[in-house]
Image (spheres, rainbow, N blue to C red):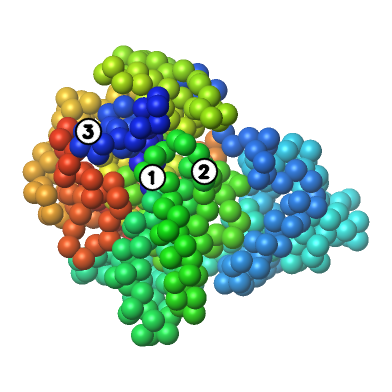
Amino acid sequence: MDSRQLTSGMTERGVGNDGRRSRAFLTGAGVGGYVVPSSVRYMLPSSDAPDVPRTPAHLRARIQTCKQADPAAWELTRALVHPARLADTLGRLTERIQRSSLPGALREQLAAALDPSPAASGAAGDAALKVFTGLPHTKSLRALCLYFEIAGDAAPASTSASAPAPHDVEDVARQCASPYELLLRVEHPSLLDLGAGDLSFEEELLDRCLPSLRRRGTVFTLHALDRLRPGSRLGGRYHADPARLRRLAGLAPNHLRFRFWGDADMMSPSTPRELLSRYTIVTCHAPATPTFAYEPTRLSPAVIDAHLAATKGDARTVRVDGEEALTVTHRGERLTFPPWKFVIQGPLALLRLAARRGALCVLAAVDDEVFWELLAQLVDDPAMRPADVVFTPDTRRAVFGDVHRALTSLDVGARCSLADVTALRRAFPGPAADGTPAPHRFRFVEIRRGAVFPDVPASATARHFPHMREEAPPWHLTLVPEPAGA
């Protein structure tokens, strides 16, 4: 879903929003973040989820599908099993498996099969690994690297056709009015849209880019995820439009590989394995509030809960046509949301995901709440990441100082390089509990003010902004990641 859909609401009778009020009623920008139990708001992917492999046979089938879906990434895994890198690869694989959402027994069996000790090696060890992959030993290791998303780090971005060198990506981002111009400058263009919504962005993107790609004889891979479950009453207008979906699915089969997945959580390890390990561009339109508006590494659950309770009120769990939902009364109107609406992920998780998957990252139609929390993670000055200080209009001015003044003075349509305003963060914390640095950082960050720009495809939420009387102009970020050691 267009990330606004993470927070799309409807009235208790199922009446859709009229689009003329605050973006709160489209994306939850003003409504999001109602207090629900921490077990709901801070939940991790569960091994009980229906799409998580629960048996070796199920896992083997998923690994085979993953291997067949991304031949380029499969080739990159050769480097990971080179003798000089094998020990490191086994360690990273074991860590990734232990942090995965696989059932505990399956994790333990996989870890035992990877045990490099002499007692566990040999024919018995090879046979144990083959149970999970159906492949010989070395290919088994490569397949597991692909499945557990280590393949993307097998080679520098410049060696992958879908991921051009960071300095080349930066040149395009600086010189071109539209970041999507990059798709016309690579041999194998690809794009992943995190939160695709009604697919209006995909339609406009193809209308603009596909004619040029067809003339060049280029095949474009376009993948889109949406958290909304197809057929659900929750989410209203932000479900994938059936007619648009049919049109996109049948469009230019010789030049377009289009896939859409509904009921897919972008942050879940069980996200469709048919996804490429790396894309030319990763996009997220209107990152959801409150999902990405509060950073858990900066704000404690108690502080987040207290702020939401003071400003938004309480939510309760209900059932709508047999499905679980959350409901809240706001300004006398009862609104209903998907049950996962208030799971707090934080902007750092979104930045890590985008940097890992894309050579270029575009975050569009970002509201004020999400923007300043994102910005705090992008700047190098740790004073702009104060512990347990919720960003409000007053605290933003105090915390960001000259940076706040420079960015809020941008006219709608204007753009600037964040590095011209303040130093970019040199290293991001990784997801591991031991404080291991993240494998990527951002070498270039461009900030624009506004929702819609000439010659730049836009989402439905971006096009609604002019009608949202209570909303300040949103923000548009273009980011170029690079390996942290570069």
Q: Position of residue 56 (x, y in %)?
A: 80, 50
Q: Secondary structure at mark 2?
A: loop
Q: Position of residue 83 (x, y in %)?
A: 70, 66
In primary-sequence order, the first of circles 2 and 3 is 3
Check contact, mark 1 vs mark 3: CB within 8 A.
no
What residue type is disc 1 on?
Tyr
Tell whether 9 sits left or right of 455.
right
Give the crowd class for mark 3: few <14, some 14-19, many >=20 residues within 10 Å. many
Whether residue 465 appears in this view of the structure is yes
Seen in the picture, residue 148 relative to 72 is either above or below; the reply is: above
- Residue 163 lies in quadrant: bottom left
State the residue lying farthest toward the right.
Answer: 124
What residue type is disc 3 on?
Ser
Whether residue 483 appears in this view of the structure is no
In primary-sequence order, the first of circles 1 and 2 is 2
In primary-sequence order, the first of circles 1 and 3 is 3
Tell whether 473 sits left or right of 92.
left
What's the mark number on residue 231? 2
- The residue positioned 33% from the left and 65% from the top of the image is 205
- Residue 89 lies in quadrant: bottom right
What's the mark number on residue 22? 3
What's the mark number on residue 238? 1
- The residue positioned 50% from the left and 39% from the top of the image is 232
* Mark 1 → mark 3, Cα distance in angstroms: 16 Å
- Considering depth in this image, is 303 or 243 the residue closer to the camera? 243
- The residue positioned 26% from the left and 36% from the top of the image is 18
